[in-house]
Amino acid sequence: MKRILLLFVLLLSISPIKSQEHLKFRGVPIDGNVNSFIDKLRDLGYYLYDSSDSDEIIMKGKFLNKDCDIIIVTTPKYRTVAKVVVSTQEYYSWSSIKKDYIEVKHQYCIKYGDPKSYEFFSKPYTEGDGDEMSALKLDKCTFMSVYYTMIGKICVKMTLSSNIWIEYEDNYNMEKMDKEIQDEI
């Protein structure tokens, strides 16, 4: 009986520590004050590009060997980092964007396992018809893979702007964001 009680107490003491884990971007936890997060990304070689929007800050730098924008999304009230979006430069050919999407997806599969994927064209478009980029820009093409973890989710997708987005959402801080938004209402 003492062993069971001891095990129970031990599990309870570990549980709060686990619940405070945060998803990481380039080894930096998606958490804390935005200025501290920016400083950590600066240490990794990113530079501040635009901080005029109070809830989103844009940095620039390399990610997966490509020039990218790094969009940092914060909670509205306390400016806690909740989400990071990597946006590649615009693609101009279907073969290039699809090749890079598949490569990024493969890299994330190695780290996070199999995603929930949605990859299809809507009528009248089909892959191989030569109009794939038009379909993408008209929202008639969906290529998106979502990796769910215990502490957040990562989504790799092609966008209407003909680029690839990699979105990192920390569960705990996204809940904080929702709460802060609801408190404002």
Image (cartoon, rainbow, N blue to C red):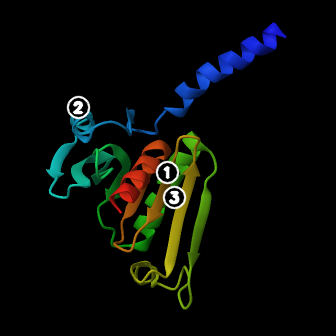
Query: Which mark is drawn over residue 102?
Result: 3
Identified at 59% across, 41% down, the residue is 150
Q: Is residue 64 something that shows in the picture? A: no
Chain-order first, disc 1 or disc 2 = 2
Residue 137 position within the rendered picture, expressed as x and y whole percent measured from the top left: 39, 80
- Is residue 154 shown left or right of residue 69? right
Question: Callout 2: helix, strand or loop?
Answer: helix
Q: Is residue 4 positioned above or below 150 on the image?
A: above
Q: Quadrant of the C terminus?
A: bottom left
Chain-order first, disc 3 or disc 1 = 3
Q: Is residue 82 something that shows in the picture? A: yes
- Is residue 114 shown left or right of residue 56? right
Residue ID for mark 1: 154
The amino acid marked with disc number 1 is: Ile
Q: CA distance from mark 3 to mark 1?
A: 15 Å
Query: Which mark is drawn over residue 43?
Result: 2
Query: Which mark is drawn over residue 67?
Result: none
Between 100 and 54, the residue placed more toward the observer is 54
Residue 79 position within the rendered picture, expressed as x and y whole percent measured from the top left: 28, 45
